[in-house]
Image (tube, helix red, strand yellow):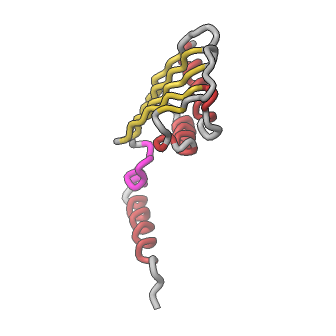
Amino acid sequence: MRAVGAPGILTVAGLLWVSYLAGGSTEALNPNARSSPMRVLFERSGGVTGMRLTAAIDGETLAPDERSQLEELIASADFFSLPERLASESPGADRFQYRVTVEWGERRHSVVIDEAASLPTLRPLLDWLLRAARSRRGS
């Protein structure tokens, strides 16, 4: 008796093994692998002083662990499924507004986020981008 679905699993495992033996990597099988170009544009505006903070982050220049962390945060936020605007029902003049654009492989998506409308799943990504923008400003 033959197990249903077993050939598919064996085929993927076989491809991984052949790639490993040939000295290659598994990146070609993973569309989110490090070989996919990634660029993140970040802007924070508003606040009490109205100062803007911006950063352009090129994934190719990040350390591997930073790149992995950024990829995980984008995926956890389900960024490419977010609407183009997350607006607050009660806008405030002293609140921040964020504009985030992610270009990853063939995908590109921009979202404008009012601080009060930030989703809990999106907050870790915004915090990471804020730290990155601040560290780049000082260098």
Work out whether residue 44 or residue 11 is closer to the camera in this orientation and state it. 44
Q: State which quadrant residue 130 falls in.
A: top right
Chief SS of the magenta region: loop
Q: Residue furthest bottom?
A: 1
Q: Residue furthest left?
A: 106
Q: Is residue 59 depicted above or below 80 in this figure?
A: above
**Count of numbered tags:** 0
Query: Is 30 part of what is drawn in magenta?
Result: yes
Q: Is residue 21 visible?
A: yes
Work out whether residue 69 or residue 102 is closer to the camera in this orientation and state it. 102
Q: Residue at x 57, y 44 (%)?
A: 76
Q: Position of residue 55 (x, y in %)?
A: 49, 21
Work out which quarter of the rendered image holds the C terminus and state it: top right
Q: Residue at x 43, y 53 (%)?
A: 30
Q: Position of residue 72 (x, y in %)?
A: 56, 43
Segment tinted magenta in the rendering: 24-34
Q: Position of residue 122 (x, y in %)?
A: 59, 37
Q: Is residue 139 visible?
A: no
Q: Is residue 83 depicted above or below 135 in this figure?
A: below
Q: Residue at x 57, y 40 (%)?
A: 73
Q: Is residue 25 rendered to the left or right of residue 126? A: left
Query: Is 29 part of what is drawn in magenta?
Result: yes
Q: Residue at x 60, y 29 (%)?
A: 89
Q: State which quadrant residue 127 falls in.
A: top right
Q: Position of residue 77 (x, y in %)?
A: 56, 41
Q: Residue furthest top?
A: 49
